[in-house]
Amino acid sequence: MLIFVSVVEEIKSRLDITDLIVSYVPSLKKAGRIYKGLCPFHTEKTPSFVVYPDSQTWHCFGACGAGGDIFNFVMRQEGYDFPGALKVLADRAGVLLKEPTPEQIKTDKRKQKLYDIIARTATFFHHNLLDIKKNESIRQYLAERNISSNTLQQFQLGYAPNSWDALKHYLLEKGYTEHDLLEVGLLVEKQDTQKTYDRFRHRLIIPIRNINGQVIGFGARALHKNQQPKYLNSPQNALFDKSAILYGLDMAKKEIRQTKQVVIVEGYMDVLQAYQQGGKTATLRGINTVKESLSNRLEYNLTAKGVHYENYLDVDIRIATLPLGKDPDDILRKDKAMWELLIKNALPLVDYQIQTIVAESDLSTAKGKSHALRTLVPVLRQVKDPVEQNHHLKQLAKLTKIDERVLRLELQRPSNVVVSRKSDPTSNMTKLLQEVSLEEHCLALLIGQPNILQRVNQRFFYNAIEGLTKNDFLSTAHGSLFSNIQAWVSNSHQAIDDLYQIVDMHLKPHLDRLQYLWQKQYQNMFVTQEQIEKDLFSLVVRMRVERKKKFWTN
Ligand SMILES: [Zn+2]
């Protein structure tokens, strides 16, 4: 079922949230501009459930911390999925649900066809593997890796035959075209002759599934020592977005929700072995390595970045150090207790960095001390919690035997003096960006790439989350700018001059600054529209988390 933003907007405009909610929450009472009542989703004696008529949203400031619009409310209250809630509310509002356009149906069908091809291919490879008599080398490989037949089935491992066209023939016979198979990267085309052949040959096949468990691509491991490369992945395509996929998430998501913990490893085999050993912690493999995922377009070292992300995403990142030359797969197979201990003793990011730098610096020399200081002070500066920062400062002083007061002084200096040489062009930029609020960052993206507003709202919509509104901005100036941008996006050709025309006089300097930000951070940085979209999405999520925190502390 395809659903459109316009339908949702229509329903929202016809229904009033207080009318709807009071029929479920009889205790709801007016308190100034808001309504308060006992939360229907958890047991409580003092009301912490709030409805905001202005923004037509609700929020529980008690145990469940839930919130959203009328759709989220009905979904939660009635246990419906989104389409279910949509039907009920459309009915209540007297809105007829429209059929999708032919164009949308066409795209949907095309995508479904590609999913089918990939699913059939996974089955084809899997059956080949089960027919193990044919494949001595793969049987040997799996035995060496100690992969059980249950794991093999759960992850639907497969074998790509040692042939140039076995898969091609199989799929063409099923009625698919070479064009289809090229599109999902199962075939490769020779440039000179334009003849096509199977991409995966004589390899162990690891189907990569999305969070819903649909196969979207393949990882393929070489079985012969002369085969290159050792691992071959499906190329990027309409279904397979390497940067957005974590291998194993479909199997691990339930446990991650329960334990609120996840271990990220590098290899497919690490994930399989962790699953097989039944470790309490869900394990995932980053298709992009963790280093890439954490890396940003700015130049600071990995850990400073990691700490920045910790703040940004509100997570606690730890690093486990494995014995030299061992990978998780080895350890899990031979000594599960040791693996659990390693995970349990994983160091918080900052401790890890302090230990590593201290270990690699010769602290008996002035040069060594200076190196340690220059590397670690930027990391400490990223630690926003003053108690934590103080703790690490003392720790560093003790380890390096540098006077604590000297360290404190370094920490308080403007960052560009310590982080880099004066001539470094990125330093001012780094400083500027550190001072940029989430709201400004968000607005800068919208100015630079106005079309993403609609796309991001759609993304929210599919996650049954309310889209970006003026009320997401705490600063009134930012709220007004957002309204201006909204009007500008829908009514003009999105030339920046048009935006300047509608923006209030006193907000124009703001706009200058936002434009500068956009240019510095995104323009000419080869950032894809998709990346910008993702950035905006997570910025808005982050803004909402911040707002909730502010409510608590005030
Ligand atoms: Zn609640």
Image (cartoon, rainbow, N blue to C red):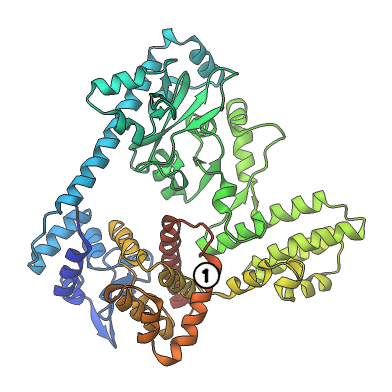
Q: Position of residue 235 (x, y in %)?
A: 44, 37
* Horizontal relation, residue 479 to residue 4: left or right: right
Residue type pointed to by label 1: Gln
Residue appearing at x 42%, y 92% in the figure: 505
State yes or no: Cβ of the residue under disc 1 lies below 8 Å from any atom of ligand 1: no
Asked if one can make out residue 406 in the rendered structure from this viewpoint, the answer is yes
Q: Looking at the image, in which quadrant does ligand 1 appear?
A: bottom left
Residue 517, compared with residue 98, is above or below; it is: below
- Residue ID for mark 1: 519
Residue appearing at x 43%, y 85% in the figure: 477
Residue furthest to the front in view is 192
Q: Quadrant of residue 363?
A: bottom right
Q: Position of residue 16 (x, y in %)?
A: 17, 76
Residue furthest to the right in view is 365
Q: Quadrant of residue 375?
A: bottom right
Residue 341, compared with residue 468, is above or below; it is: above
Residue furthest to the top in view is 133
* Horizontal relation, residue 184 to residue 89: left or right: right
Q: Position of residue 486 (x, y in %)?
A: 32, 75
Q: Position of residue 431 (x, y in %)?
A: 64, 72
- Nearest to the observer: residue 373 or residue 478: 478
- Nearest to the observer: residue 131 or residue 222: 222
